Amino acid sequence: MNSTVRNTWTLFARPGGALSSLSWGLQQWRGIRVKVFDGNLERALVVLQRKMQSSGMERLIKRQETHHIKNSEKRVLARQKLEQKLRSQDLARKLKAILIKKVR
């Protein structure tokens, strides 16, 4: 949970992060607020995490790249993405041929 709070802080600390300049002002103005009752900080963090999940903020943080990807890893990912695209196109082509045969 600590990393989530830290990533949230870095997201709001710099306006050019994952938010555009227009929504940055709105988000800074609105924000996500959590009340701490009886000094129970753990409960407040749980409520904060639940609010972040429901608002989609957690997805924005996780989507944000936090580490460097080596060029070799980029090549592997690009190759996997290309193979997935080719498989998808091949499957679409086969399904189209099957549907055309059924229509006739």
Image (tube, grey):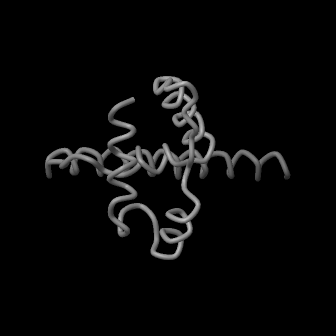
Residue 36 is left or right of residue 102, and the answer is left
Residue 94 is left or right of residue 39, and the answer is right
**Residue at the spot x=57%, y=32% of the render?**
47
Q: Residue furthest bottom?
A: 22
**Residue at the spot x=37%, y=55% of the render?**
11
Q: Residue furthest right?
A: 103
**Vertical order, 21 against 30 (above or below):** below
Which corner quadrant holds the N terminus? top left
Residue 53 is left or right of residue 100, and the answer is left
**Vertical order, 22 against 90 (above or below):** below
Q: Position of residue 65 (x, y in %)?
A: 31, 50
Which sits in the foreground, 37 or 61?
A: 37
Which sits in the foreground, 38 or 25?
A: 38
**Residue at the spot x=82%, y=45% of the render?**
102
Which sits in the foreground, 97 or 62?
A: 62
Residue 66 is left or right of residue 36, and the answer is left
**Residue at the spot x=58%, y=38% of the render?**
35
Q: Position of residue 37 (x, y in %)?
A: 58, 29
Which sits in the foreground, 71 or 47?
A: 47
Q: How many marks?
A: 0
Q: Position of residue 36 (x, y in %)?
A: 54, 33
Q: Position of residue 50 (x, y in %)?
A: 58, 33
Which image quadrant is residue 38 in?
top right
